[in-house]
Image (cartoon, rainbow, N blue to C red):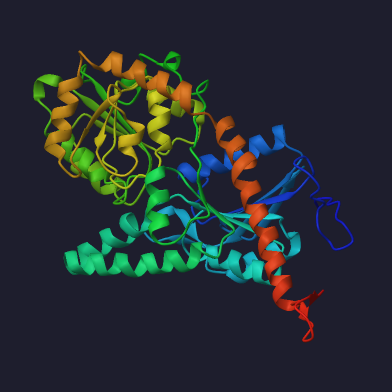
Amino acid sequence: MLLKTRDAGGRLPVVDGTAPMLLCDLTQSYSPSGGGGISTYLREKRDYVLTHTPHHLLQIVPGPVDRITVNGRHIFAEIGAEPVRGSPNYRFILRTDAVREVLADYRPDILESLCPWVLPWTAIRHRRAFPETTLVAGYRTDFPNAHVYRVGREKFGELGGQFCRWLIWGYAEITYREFDWVYTLGEDARIELAKRSIRRTSVLPLGVDTALFHPARRDPGYRAALGLTAQGPMLAYAGRIDNEKRADRLVAMFRQLPPALHAAMVLIGDGKLRARLQAEARGLQIAFPGFERDREELARALASADIYVSAMADETFGVSVLEAQASGLPIVGVDGGAMHDRVPAGTGLLGPVDDTAAMAANVAALWPEQAAAMGAAGRSLVESRYSWRRTFETLFGEVYPAALANTARRLEEDAALLFPPRRDPRSRTVRV
């Protein structure tokens, strides 16, 4: 059991920036075998907290059963949840009472909500019971578009999709205004929140391990190990193989590449579309090795490719793109979401969303003449702008202090409402 040095009121002491606090991450978007940006963030944050701060870290995620694992200052709490239909690597917590029980037991000083569904309101209800709790939300997914509008359009047509998006933006407004602070992964998302009067916000760029993801990890034998024999450029994608990531567009794009290019492609990951696409790609030079648990093996895979491809149109940041750039790859993607920020001119080529012919043309256009220079420019960009240390220095140096300050203001306002000053009817003075 974690030993917590608390004050008489049961709180961990928060005196200055070095006083130990209990921090908490809360998310649905975790899988030990599904990858994803949030899983990477949780791992990197754990390492940063344990090596650079005196704080304790509680991370609450879905799991097969209820289980709490304590390792020094790190507490990993799994809440038993059923697998997501069609995405067996992910689970979805519905037992919010179990989450509330863990939160009430540990009573974190700062509670960071990392996904938009169900759990933000679990955090809000916990804060209503323990008002001194500081709430931070990460707006990490463009869910009104990526999750709601896309599905609504497919089921109900364009007007139906727009109506669903309008409704879910109402949910987002009500939800995120409850938080002491919200961070986005880019300026565009921050502007969208400001349009909905959500203005206690910061931008938190994510990072990449440039020592792990490095061109030097290239393995000339990797292609053959996958069973691929084509000797032209090898394209790579790493992430969920599902509808949100538009993985089917990558297979469609591959079919439109010029035969003379002799290209191969590897789709690293798992998801609801994997089996179907694997069947559709039979006979093509496309490999589906599944999710890669070993980060060093993933780094080897990326460095062994020649071009990174992504059809994702609603990316809010794109950690996988940074990892590919750190590995020395040029990017071929679509001009949507955060991709135009991740792939500036000279580091790759972007085309219209869902235009697989344009994507194929961009692959052919940059290979081989532009590939090396674009890959080197991408590597230089990542080295100069993105690191996990910078991410967490911003989180601990800007986001959390702003949130704590708002908590203090909120508590003062609540106290004033409970104990308003008394006005002397005989004068203009106020008795306190």
Residue at 33% from the left image edge and 52% from the top image edge? 272
Residue 187, compared with residue 68, is above or below; it is: above
Residue 55, compared with residue 409, is above or below; it is: above
In the image, taking residue 84 as reference, residue 430 lies left or right, namely: right
In the image, taking residue 332 as reference, residue 261 lies left or right, namely: left
Give the percent coordinates (x, y) of residue 161.
24, 65
Give the percent coordinates (x, y) of residue 291.
42, 39
Q: For this rendering, which residue is in front, 132 or 241?
A: 132
In the image, taking residue 34 as reference, residue 49 lies left or right, namely: right
Question: How many labels sit on residues?
Answer: 0
Q: For this rendering, which residue is in front, 241 or 54?
A: 54
Give the percent coordinates (x, y) of residue 36.
45, 43
Residue at 63% from the left image edge and 47% from the top image edge? 400
Furthest residue to the right?
Answer: 8
In the rendered image, is residue 340 in sight? Answer: yes
Looking at the rendering, in which quadrant would you find the C terminus?
bottom right
Residue 154, compared with residue 367, is above or below; it is: below
Residue at 52% from the left image edge and 68% from the top image edge? 94
In the rendered image, is residue 327 in sight? Answer: no
Q: For this rendering, which residue is in front, 78 or 317?
A: 317
Give the percent coordinates (x, y) of residue 249.
21, 42
Q: For this rendering, which residue is in front, 221 or 258?
A: 258
Residue 128, compared with residue 289, is above or below; it is: below
Q: Residue 26 occupies which quadrant of the picture?
A: bottom right
Q: Residue 173 occupies which quadrant of the picture?
A: bottom left
